[in-house]
Structures are given as C-alpha cells and as structure tokens.
C-alpha cells in the first residue's frame, strides 16, 4: 500500500485567510482524492485530482473556494480559501492502492478557523 | 445517488465483549471497504471486501453483495478498538468512494 503524508497535521487559522494543505505519496499514482470531514460527520469527497488536468469537483464544492494543484504523479495541494468557522474540519487526501477501487488515506489535516 | 447506512450509530461495550456492525447500501457496488478512524483522526484500512468473508485476527467481515449489506465482527473487544468505524463503497460506473454514516464504538475497561 502507498505511504501518504500530509502537511500541516493541524492548524488554527483566522477567518478570511487561506491555508494550503500538501499531500505527498511515496509512489506514482494516477488519481488523488481530497475529502472533508466536518466535526462528528462522515467523509465527503471534495474533488478528484488527475495529473495534468483540472480537478473534478463534487456538487457543493467550487474551485474558487478549494483550488487544487496536481503538478506531478506524487504530489497535490488543496487550498481552503477565505476561511470561515464553517470550514473547521479534517481534510484528508487519498489514493487508489495497487488493487483497483481500494483507497488509502493520509493522516489528515485538522483545521480550526476562529 | 447511493445511500450507505450504518447501524448502530453508537455502541458502548465492556472490554471483552463481541460486536457486530452493519452496513447497508442501496445500489450495486464494485467494492466495499471497512475503515477504523482512531481518536487522532487517522483512517486505518481494515478490509477490502467486495464479496465473501475475510478474517484478520479478532476482526472479520462478510459482504453479501446480492443483498446489499456487509457486516463487521469484532471479538474480545479491547479499549484500543474504540473509535468510529466506516464502511465505504465504490458504485458501479462511478469512480468515487462513498462513505457510510459511521458507527461510534466505545469500549469501557
């Protein structure tokens, strides 16, 4: 299985600012995924990021709020822009493992917006 | 879209007890995974189980795809089993993972 790291592991930010979260994988992968987990809730897919193309966003998520970069096959970033307290969540990246349809997750970034 | 419901939503057990967690899904799936989210938020892969039965130590899982449900069994519970358990499915024809509602398990010493 892939080894996935995320930076930062946690952060406390002021409303109106932006935070960029990094996701690094130890092997080349075609697709990377970004999820949000609001407090006490399940995980919701934000977008799918393929290298060399625009990310595909799920309903309710827009590029202006959550811009994503995918510069190569091992790295991606998610930016949470113009943050409000409602953006306080755990943000997780994931990749598909060697077995199709099996996903592995990074350790997550715990974001608190004050 | 697909609905993925887990039951029970909360479960409190004494150490040493056994438990069964259920995941029901409303459409045909390519895959089903079970995860354990520990108190630090880390998602740990437990099983990749589109059908059949698998066992790993004190944990086992069964998926009956034709009846659209999966079960996770935990035997001889330990306090380290506490956390939230999620099932997640890949819908046929849709390249994304949809998570269930989760079961919060608390094991009391």
Image (cartoon, coloured by chain):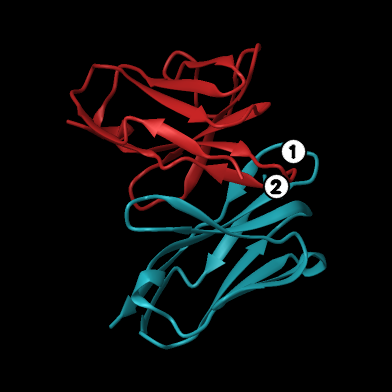
Chain colours: A red, B cyan
Q: Which mark is residue B90?
A: 2
In x, y percent, where is residue B67? Answer: 78, 69
The reply to whether dot 1 and dot 2 touch (C-beta < 8 Å) is yes
What residue is at 74 percent from the left and 38 percent from the top?
B94
Horizontal placement of A100 versus A87: left or right? right
CA separation in Å, label 1 and label 2: 7 Å
Q: In this view, does B100 lie above or below B83?
A: above
In x, y percent, where is residue B62? Answer: 70, 72
Which residue in the structure is indicated by mark 1? B94
Chain ID for label 1?
B
Which quadrant would residue B38 be assigned to in this image? bottom left
Chain ID for label 2?
B
Please rate how many residues cluster around mark 1, counting C-alpha atoms within 10 Å: few if below 14, some from 14 to 19, many from 20. few
Across the whole image, how many numbered discs are drawn on residues?
A: 2
Q: Is mark 1 on a helix, strand or loop?
A: loop
Q: Is residue B91 above or below residue B100?
A: above
What residue is at 58 percent from the left and 40 percent from the top?
A2
């Amino acid at each position: 299985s892939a080894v996935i790291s995320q930076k930062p592991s946690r952060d406390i930010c002021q409303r109106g600012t932006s935070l960029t979260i990094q996701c690094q994988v130890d092997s080349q992968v075609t697709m990377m995924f970004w999820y949000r987990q609001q407090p006490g809730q399940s995980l919701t897919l934000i977008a799918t990021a393929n290298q060399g193309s625009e990310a595909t966003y799920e309903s309710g998520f827009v590029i202006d709020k959550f811009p994503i970069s995918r510069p190569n096959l091992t790295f991606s970033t998610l930016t949470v822009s113009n943050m409000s307290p409602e953006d306080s969540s755990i943000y997780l990246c994931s990749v598909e493992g060697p077995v199709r349809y099996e996903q592995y997750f990074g350790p997550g970034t715990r974001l608190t917006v004050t | 879209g697909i609905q993925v419901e887990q039951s029970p939503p909360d479960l409190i057990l004494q150490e040493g007890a056994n438990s069964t967690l259920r995941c029901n899904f409303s459409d045909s799936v390519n895959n089903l995974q079970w995860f354990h989210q520990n108190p630090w938020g880390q998602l740990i892969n437990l099983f990749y189980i589109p059908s059949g039965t698998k066992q790993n130590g004190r944990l086992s899982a069964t998926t009956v795809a034709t009846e659209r449900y999966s079960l996770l069994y935990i035997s001889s519970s330990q306090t380290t089993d506490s956390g939230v358990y999620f099932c997640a499915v890949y819908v046929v024809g849709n390249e994304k993972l949809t998570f269930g509602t989760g079961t919060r398990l608390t094991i009391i010493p």
